[in-house]
Amino acid sequence: MPSTEATVSQEDETALLQTLRRGDEAAFAELVDAYSPALLRLAMTYVRTADVAEEVVQETWVGVIRGIDRFEGRCSLKSWLFTILRNTAISRGERERHSIPMSSLSPDDDGPVLDPDRFLPADHSRFPGHWAIGPTAWPVPEEGLMAAETREIIAGAIRELPPSQRAVIALRDVEGWPPEEVCEALEVSEGNQRVLLHRARTKVRAALETYFGAVEPTLAEV
């Protein structure tokens, strides 16, 4: 579910930048309040502990203060903030020996999206490569999909994703970013972003299927 936190509107960005460059503490506090929760969530996709993630966010804001006069507006203010966070987190991760190389932000950082046992073998007499164990309908939200324990299953599945997939699904599905902003902030191509998001969503769905017991033999197996 996309984040409902406040964001700085596009039309106010120029005025906000001007006040930030004048050293306006209230403007800086507004920026911190708007983006710190999302920055912290993204930092957690790069480092392993909440304490380190909080330190990364603090270092990010220091970087913003030091760099605001040099910000040329070639990207949105939001993308600039998250780029600083990503670079800070990668640097901190290297110091902590938990680094995430840029090469990890590719669609080839993982194995099959689904367990091969979910599909019939290639030499099956009737339905080669088709579902052997297929998805079934889940309960609708009113029946418990958004219950607290289910949300924890989703959060746990996201935590188990490879770092690149966690970063993309965090921005797309948790923060509600459009794909072009995700590509800009994470410096990945549109195609890579789509593949990473597909892999992440598929694994989260698989975790929910397991939780709901929503898998069953298909007709092809009968």
Image: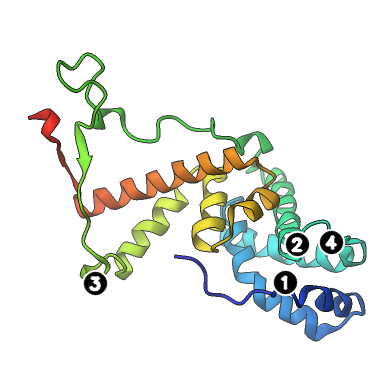
Asked whether disc 1 touches disc 2, contact meaning CB atoms under 8 Å apart, the reply is yes
Mark in front: 1 vs 3: 1
The extreme front residue here reads 11
Indicate the amino acid at tag 2.
Ser
> Which picture quadrant has residue 102?
top right
Where is residue 214 shown, x and y percent of the image?
Answer: 20, 49
Label 3 crowd (10 A; few <14 / some 14-19 / many >=20): few
Q: Is residue 147 above or below residue 193?
A: below
Which three-letter amino acid code belongs to the residue tagged 1?
A: Gln
| Sequence-wise first label, 1 or 4 | 1
Q: How far, Cα to Cα, is label 2 from label 3? A: 38 Å
Mark 2 and mark 4: Cα distance apart in space = 6 Å
Residue bearing mark 2: 76
For mark 1, what is the residue? 10
Marks 3 and 4 sit apart, C-alpha to C-alpha, by: 44 Å
x and y percentages locating residue 22 in the rendered image: 92, 79
Q: Which residue does the numbered mark 4 point to in the structure image?
A: 73
Task: Please give the name of the residue rendered at 27% of the width and 68% of the height, measured from the top-left corner.
Answer: 141
Residue 142: assigned label = 3
